[in-house]
Image (cartoon, rainbow, N blue to C red):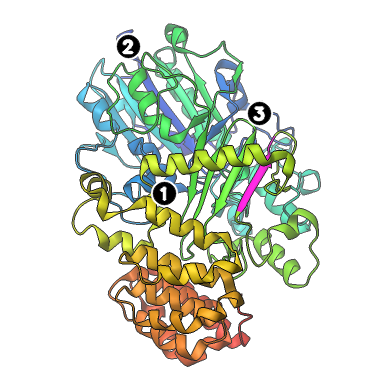
Amino acid sequence: MTPRSSCLIPILLAALPAPGLGASRTPADRPNILWVTCEDISPNLGSFGDAYAVTPNLDRLASQGVRYTHAFATIGVCAPARSTIITGMYPPSIGSQHMRCRGTLPEGVRMFPEYLRDAGYYCTNNSKTDYNLPTPEGTWDESSDTATYRDRAEGQPFFAVFNFTTSHESQIRLPEDQYRERVAGFSPGMFHDPARATVPPYHPDTPAVRRDWARYADMITYMDGQVGALLDQLEADGLLDDTIVFYYSDHGAGMPRGKRWLYDSSTRVPFIVRFPEKYARLSPGSPGETTDRLISFVDLAPTVLSLAGLEIPGHMQGSAFLGDSQAGPRDLVFGFRDRMDERYDLIRMVRDKRYTYIRNYLPHLPYFHHQHISYMYEMPTMRDWQRLADSGELTGGAAAFMTLSKPVEELYDTRLDPSEVENLASSPEHREILERLRAEHRRWQLEVVDLGLLPESDLRTRFGERAPYDAVRADPSCYPIGRIAEAADLAGRGDPSDVDDLALLLDDPDPAVRWWGATGLAIRGDSALPVADRLASSLEDPAPWVRVAAADALARLGRVDEAMPALVDAMGSDNEWVRLRAINVLDRLDGLASPAEEVIRGALDDPNNYVVRAAEHAVEGIGAGPGDGE
């Protein structure tokens, strides 16, 4: 492999014990499989056409392997994406879709390395898990920051994961002394000049933004050296010719409007697979070639099992794209966005090779305004972007994502508009495409039984001790998804003439339907005034999350005094997700929330850290004065 800066090699080698089993061979029909993963990068590699990139090791790997140009994460953030990978299932179907939630594995579902272990593979993970699910005993032979394939038995095939965190979002904004230490071994040609950075049209072009993009590229270069060191080690151990090597990122760029969203900047990832000559028959192409086959993270688990010659469990919702059990190419990939840290949202995505369709179920929640994610706002780019939005200095694509609401639907032609800034959802010329992808979204939603239509507080209580996936399949009536989806559609339409229909939903026997009724009236804003008294009666609803939604809608109508007792009461709920919903509403009110200041300050000690983060921002807002009602 390409030589690397000497400062990078010890980082990897320190995690590996001295050679012992390196030269052992595995049977020809049992390939070793190595996953080399990194965090928070889009296909910003030289081999993927990025002239700004300095990635010699990954470019060499690409020259020896096949590049997938249409590889997609199911979401633009780590934990739910990893939940997809480890199960081969869509997180909204099992209830693990919210960021850093505590989902439950369905009965009989195993994390896929267990199947490999049953077949004799030695399975190691070095070292991030973050699956949004408890990791059962027996998933890995070893999962730690010293885990390595070298500890296997003589002749035993391995599946090994090495995850590099040095390109993570947090590394872009390293303090200067830590950044200098990180890049101390760089030669002059490895640094990235901010003046040469390509600023996407959805970002303002400022020195801070350019600096962040340059640091992002620097961290990719550093990670490239780590990958090179690992591949050198594999070769030195005599295993390169027996090992299928995968390289990919866990989702797109860790920059604002990349990470956490569902655009290509969020979900499209670099993806390379190298096949040694021994297993060339399994490759979709010759070394150095590309394939535009659509692949999704939900396909990774079945693909590894297929390469190992194992049966793919029936519960897996993806399909193998390599190996003896590979399926035909998929036409679509699907994505989801639910709660991100302390802020709620509900977005779904479906994409073919050209068009991206996005459905915003909560269009009254802006992209960024009043959706302050504290971790995201540590990025200088985010703070600069917000500052320019507040001063009215933004134009074009940068302004489009700083509006006070979202469109219900978005449609982008990624061939003509790769940055996805021109929304074609209202274009008559694209109506057929919009309707086709809209229908595919609903088909998928019903097929996987998308649990995201439930408020998180409802999701965690509705099914008792049963895993949600098991409960809804044993008794579909416990989650009438068709009726709830219809309520969600009515809520999101934004038509002021249907407020009476929404008010009728407030009497439905299912609390999720009632929640969508109240939420739909919040979306209508002032148009809901004719049914405000009916809405006020929902402040006594038996479901606390419905009471919070009704309080939110009333506050948007200026009836804050009526809404406040319900919000204060919700802050004392035993259900942490009810508390999080309530603090989100209080935070939006800024100074109008001052009657609840004592309760808000009390939430600074909440056991749920996301409640704490939202409360911290709400305390700042109380001092800033009355809210704008958005």
The percent position of residue 497, horizontal first and vertical second, equals: 59, 68
Closer to the chain start, of discs 3 and 1, is 3
**Residue at image point 29% right, 31% down:** 113
Element assignment for label 2: loop
For badge 3, the amino acid type reads: Phe
The magenta segment: 409-414
Q: Which mark is residue 79?
A: 1
Disc 3 from disc 1: Cα separation:
26 Å
Disc 2 from disc 3: Cα separation:
33 Å
Q: Which mark is residue 48?
A: 3
Closest to the observer, 78 or 121: 78
Callout 3–callout 1 Cβ contact below 8 Å: no
Callout 2–callout 3 Cβ contact below 8 Å: no
Callout 1–callout 2 Cβ contact below 8 Å: no
Task: Specify whether residue 574 is painted magenta.
Answer: no
Can you say whether 504 is above or below 480 in the image? below
Q: Which residue is mark 2?
A: 25
Closest to the observer, 202 or 355: 355
Where on the picture, by quarter, is residue 308? top left
Is 395 left or right of 551, judged from the image as shown? Answer: right
CA neighbours of label 1 inside 10 A, class few (<14), some (14 to 19), many (20+): many
Element assignment for label 1: helix
Task: Kindly report the secondary structure that dominates the magenta region of the rendered protein.
Answer: strand
Q: Which mark is residue 99?
A: none
